[in-house]
Image: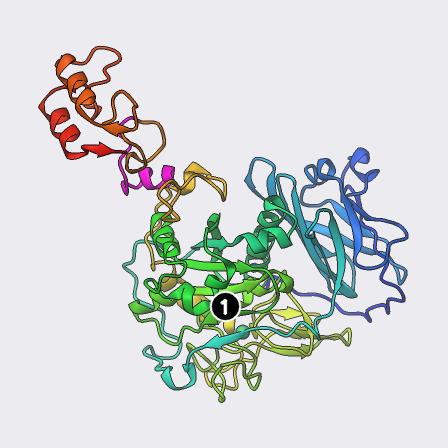
Amino acid sequence: MAFTRSASPVAAWTTLALTIAVTAAGPRPDVSATRVWSPTPTAELPMAIDVSAATLARITPGDHLTTPLPGGAARFIVTRRVELGPDRFTITANVDGPAPGWLIAAVHGDGFAAAGHAGVTFRVRGAAGGGRHLEIVDSETLEWCSVSDDVATRRVDEMGVGDTPADGGCDDGSSIDVLVVYAAAARIAAGGTANLLAEIDLMIANSNEAYSNSDVQTQLHLVHAREVSSPESDLGLGSLTDPADGRADGVHLLRDAYAADQVVAVVSGGGGVANGMWTLEPDMADLAFCVSGRDSLPFIMTHEVGHNLGCCHASGDGGGCPDGGGLLFPYSNGHRFTGLSGTLWRTVMAYSPGEWSPLISNPAVLFDGKPTGVPGDTSSGADNARTINQSAPVVANWRCHDDACELLDLPPDAADCDGDEIPDLCAIAVGLGADLNDDGVLDACQCLTDADESGATDFVDLLLVLAGWGPCDGVCPGDVDFDGEVGFTDVLAVLAAWGPC
Ligand SMILES: [Zn+2]
């Protein structure tokens, strides 16, 4: 029971002014004296926000984040901090008090993004032109998402209700490897790469918090985020999913290079769309794609990946889900419920009305004093947590985990000299291209046979090979295949590449 809350009425907020300060749980007065982020005092919404990254860097579980609001201070207690790399981490907190609420923040170098609920749902993110802004999110007006395809008629329920997929795959299901791609438009809308990367980390953290809250036994793991050369218009669900339509096809190569089980395109604008998984057949691996609009931060990726994991909306919500409810299983439905506080909540997969909550429907987990799902094996049930626990061991095996590229920790704009969307260093690491001269650039992009660097492979280069014949000791211009010896293979290479570079 990971996420049970006692209940009391939620204060009515009279204004939207919001300031966040931090106090330490233990003897850390230097932290308590410093605000983490604060609005420009007189600004209207969305208001500019200054972030104290140095203070954020010192927050640990047990610390308190106090939010002085006109209706009464909201106090969060930090529950989790996940280190993702140098100057890169996420923080998760719950309201420390009777009214339910939550906070998730992500720091990625100079980038920052946060979202939470304390009577109102709010978020902090970057903006085009620079700076960061605090926005109040109206859950009722941000409608979003559709499930693609005719899932209502194609659902087959290959497995019996409650069955768990047979074991024997390469990955154990505890982690689903996710590749995120985006185009320049999303980066510009976020005010730069660092902010967008923080938003992506926030979306992943939101998913993992929802899973943890709801006893879902898997976590999303971001293996790479890359800005692709395609225009954002090529990142629609259809063109993203199709590996050979001439639009963003390189994303499929990138997915294989990073061995990603799941691919998410983050786009500017709001809403999202996903392929709904209606069966656990192996060919569903080809449909593990979804699109998430950053204007629907922070829940949209959790929602769309949920469809890829077999979850659907609350029964009756529509949006491409079967009329009778369910998707992978009859009970694969989201849920809305009124908590003891009087707040109408919705789990991540349910449509409005209702305030978003970092929850996957699960009848065994309480939030705001009420069950977050409905028990049962039929379509009257609402148990997407059970659904993901059944599908994750299969989805985690869409690709066998291979961190050869991930360990390179490449930036989203790492060099890709041949334009196939796979960064050169990654392609070299997984054997998709040679780098005989060990310079980190694919040989295919270079003219290694142009020994005199004249711009062409010609007679002068052949003479250099002949002049240097024999074992190479030191610098050997004639060793154009970099095998440590100038010989017949170099002659063949020069002749094969004869002509302009
Ligand atoms: Zn949806």
Viewer-proximal residue, 209 or 162? 209
Say left or right for 152 vs 169.
right
Say left or right for 444 vs 203.
left
Q: Quadrant of residue 193?
A: top right
Q: Position of residue 40 (x, y in %)?
A: 85, 49
Which residue is depicted at the point 32% across and 52% down? 400
Q: Could you tell me if residue 448 is visible in this image?
A: no
Q: Residue furthest bottom?
A: 324
Q: How is the image coloured?
A: rainbow
Decide: is 75 above or below 432. Answer: below
Quadrant of ligand 1: it is bottom right
Q: Which residue is mark 1?
A: 306
Count of numbered badges drawn on the protein: 1
Q: Residue furthest left?
A: 488
**Where, quadrant-wise, is the N terminus in this rendering?**
bottom right
**Where, quadrant-wise, is the C terminus in this rendering?**
top left
Which residue is depicted at the point 47% across and 70% down? 274
Viewer-proximal residue, 113 or 478? 478
Instruction: Identify the element where label 1 is drawn.
Output: helix
Say left or right for 31 vs 432.
right
Which residue is depicted at the point 79% across and 58% down? 46
Q: Is residue 432 magenta?
A: yes
Mark 1 residue type = Gly
Ligand 1 near label 1 (Cβ, under 8 Å)? yes
Residue density around tag 1, few if under 14, some if 14–19, many if 20 or more, within 10 Å:
many
Q: Quadrant of residue 366?
A: bottom right
Query: The magenta stretch spans which residues?
Result: 424-437
Q: Position of residue 471 (x, y in %)?
A: 14, 13
Q: Quadrant of residue 242?
A: bottom left
